[in-house]
Amino acid sequence: MIKLSVSVCMKDGRAGSFGSRGTECTISEIEIDLGLLAKPEQVAATIRQWYDLTELAAQERLDKLNAKAAAATNGAAAHPTAHVPAPVQAPRNTPAAAAPVNGFAAQPEDDLADEDDDPPASGGQLLGWARKQEADMKGWLIGYGQRRKFAPRIIDWNQNQINEAYAAARKALAAAR
């Protein structure tokens, strides 16, 4: 068996505002049968299906956040978001598709803080954010990067790594509260 994790993070910029709304959906530990490796096109199709499923869940959550914000501003129209893909069914060729993974169904994660909070755009901004936190988040981020085998210096991380580490750090801070 091969274990796969699929994560989709979406943001919706808002005109006339300095912030954005965002959400993330992660499915962890999807098991793929090694027998499928002989058919790379089938493995790729299975992985694409899982990404489509997580993208759909994240898009639905983002649409819900936008609708909630529109209702809060006296019925103003929510800002349009990307096209919502047609619903996809979870792949049926893995044991993980039949039941929730580790007892948890794929659910989009709620935005952990204010709607106007943007993830850092660079490793330097991530370090600046870490310094402003009550806990030693710089040390936590360094350890997280080492465990995930990111570049040794936070300032050398790519945007996906920055987004992933930021989301995980915020989740850890929320759990500590």
Image: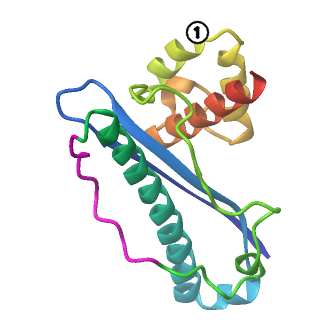
Total numbered circles: 1
* In-image side of 74 versus 126 (left or right): left
Check residue 141 for magenta coloring: no
Q: Which residues are magenta?
A: 76-87
Question: Who's the residue at 65% across and 90% down the image?
Answer: 38
Q: Quadrant of the N terminus?
A: bottom right
Question: Who's the residue at 62% across and 38% down the image?
Answer: 150
Q: Which residue is mark 1?
A: 131
Q: Residue 100: image x %, image y %?
A: 75, 69
Q: Quadrant of the C terminus?
A: top right
The answer to which quarter of the image holds residue 138 is top right
| Image height of 159 relative to 32, above or below | above
Check residue 86 for magenta coloring: yes
Question: Who's the residue at 70% across and 63% down the image?
Answer: 105
| Image height of 8 relative to 4, above or below | above
* In-image side of 22 versus 13 (left or right): right
Question: Who's the residue at 82% across and 62% down the image?
Answer: 102
SS under mark 1: helix
| Image height of 127 relative to 134, above or below | below
Q: Residue 117: image x %, image y %?
A: 43, 25
Q: Residue 115: image x %, image y %?
A: 42, 30
Q: As rendered, which of 69 and 159 lies closer to the eye? A: 69
The answer to which quarter of the image holds residue 135 is top right
Give the main secondary structure of the magenta stretch. loop
